[in-house]
Amino acid sequence: MTYTIYALCREHRTSGMEGSITVNGMERNLSSFRKLSCYIMQDNQLHGNLTVEEAMAVATALKLPSATTSADKEEVIHEILETLGLSEHHKTMTSNLSGGQKKRLSIALELVNNPPIMFFDEPTSGLDSSSCFQCISLLKTLARGGRTIICTIHQPSARLFEMFDHLYTLADGQCVYQGSTGRLESKVPDYNNKKAMEESLNKEWNKNDLSQVQEKFRDGEPLVVQMDSEKQDNVDVALLGGEGSPRRYATSELTQFWVTLMYLRLFAHILVGFLIGALYYDIGDDGSKVLSNLGFLFFNMLFLMYTSMTITILSCEYSNITIITFAVSGFFVSFNAIPVYLRWITYLSYIRYGFEGTALATYSFDRPKLKCHQTYCHFKNPETTLEELDMLNADFTLDIAALCLIFLVLRISAFLFLRWKLKSTR
């Protein structure tokens, strides 16, 4: 059932299935539908280091238009937290919330832009009976407020069962009942827990009867629920329009850049630049400190590379590949010392071209001899440094061209892979 609701919400690719999804009898516009609907997963995707108020502030900054004033955003946050019973916990860290409170916070984050249609993947999973009732009661309140709430649920209690307006029951992937809970009361006694119906449908000895029920509903009328007039006012134009909103997001890219704390990464680069500059200050023209200067050049590349990797979690199997590129970069071992049968790997190492290019830019182009404040400086002549690194005959232009080529190949490959993944899920 989880896969079914995900396919309905995000139009996940379903092999061997065909048909269309309509809203109030009209073909759904997928782009607009995604903007004005939300999908709340079973696991709460929350940032544990933020308080409830901070998490809501980030959500309002990203989802509400930039023209919205701070006072209006605070009013939205206060109203949502008050409605969901989280006002008393607005200063509580997300990681310290209970399971039911985390679920309510997940709902609160999606209510910021007031979506007319909300999908929930097993909202009662992992909650106790009291929290389950509070959660479903909250969804019932949201539905009465003019929203369409669609959720999956397994083995609900009789108390929860009666709170749903419409049911679509599946057994072995086939529909066995669709309609209101009121129509089911005559078929399921009040003293019997409603999950007994599910248990009876799962018994092996009832396979024949189950097939007959499935066939009956397969040939019957589809589940079509006409939205109330209050809901139609919210979704008719937005979800059924062909063109949709001219802007993809409510806020600009610059606002998203600022809200997502990307400016902190910029500040970190500047701060590290000052620290490293102070550590390696005035060694570039000293012939006795050439090795330290090479370490400085190599560290710069590593810093720029690893800071870009910190955005996502680098898996072990992928980090092992980067170790190979380090080993053949020319910093730890010269190219001539690498066995012939492994030397081809150096031509695939972007670190090799980066380090070679920076070394050539520093010690090539007819640079004069370095200063030497000691009796003897082996690397006083810049050509000696390049010779020790086996870069004396290297081509700076070739290094730049190789880096540009690797950049384009990786970018295009990533784009094609992501495009293929997106198509495979539609």
Image (cartoon, helix red, strand yellow):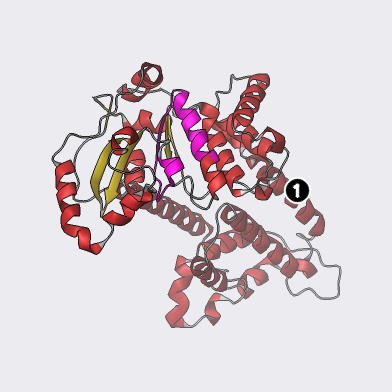
Q: In this view, does 366 lie above or below 345?
A: above
Q: Residue at x 53, y 68 (%)?
A: 316
Q: Is residue 256 above or below residue 276?
A: above
Left/right placement of residue 36 relative to residue 184 reads: right
Residue 251 appearing in the image: no
Q: Relative to 2, is 359 above or below? A: below
Q: How many marks?
A: 1
Q: Is residue 148 magenta?
A: yes
User: Could you tell me residue 112's position as x and y percent?
Assistant: 55, 29
Q: Quadrant of the C terminus?
A: top left
In the image, 304 versus 42, the foreground residue is 42
Residue found at x 27% / y 61%: 203
State the residue at coordinates (34%, 36%): 181
- When the figure is inspected, residue 118 is found, relative to residue 202, above or below; the finding is above
Residue segment shown in magenta: 134-161
Is 11 in front, or is 40?
Answer: 40
- State the image coordinates of residue 46 (x, y, percent, origin top left): 58, 46
Q: Given the image, on which type of amino acid does mark 1 rest?
A: Leu
- Is residue 181 in view? yes
Q: Mark 1 sits on what residue?
A: 271
Q: Residue 250 location in percent, x, y? A: 51, 26
Q: Is residue 268 magenta?
A: no
Taking 320 as reference, is 56 left or right? right
Rendered residue at 52%/71% (across/down): 320
Nearest to the observer: residue 354 or residue 317: 317
Give the image location of residue 266, x and y in percent: 67, 43
Secondary structure, mark 1, is helix
Residue 92's image quarter?
Answer: top right
Mark 1, Cα crowd under 10 Å, few <14 / some 14-19 / many 20+, is: few
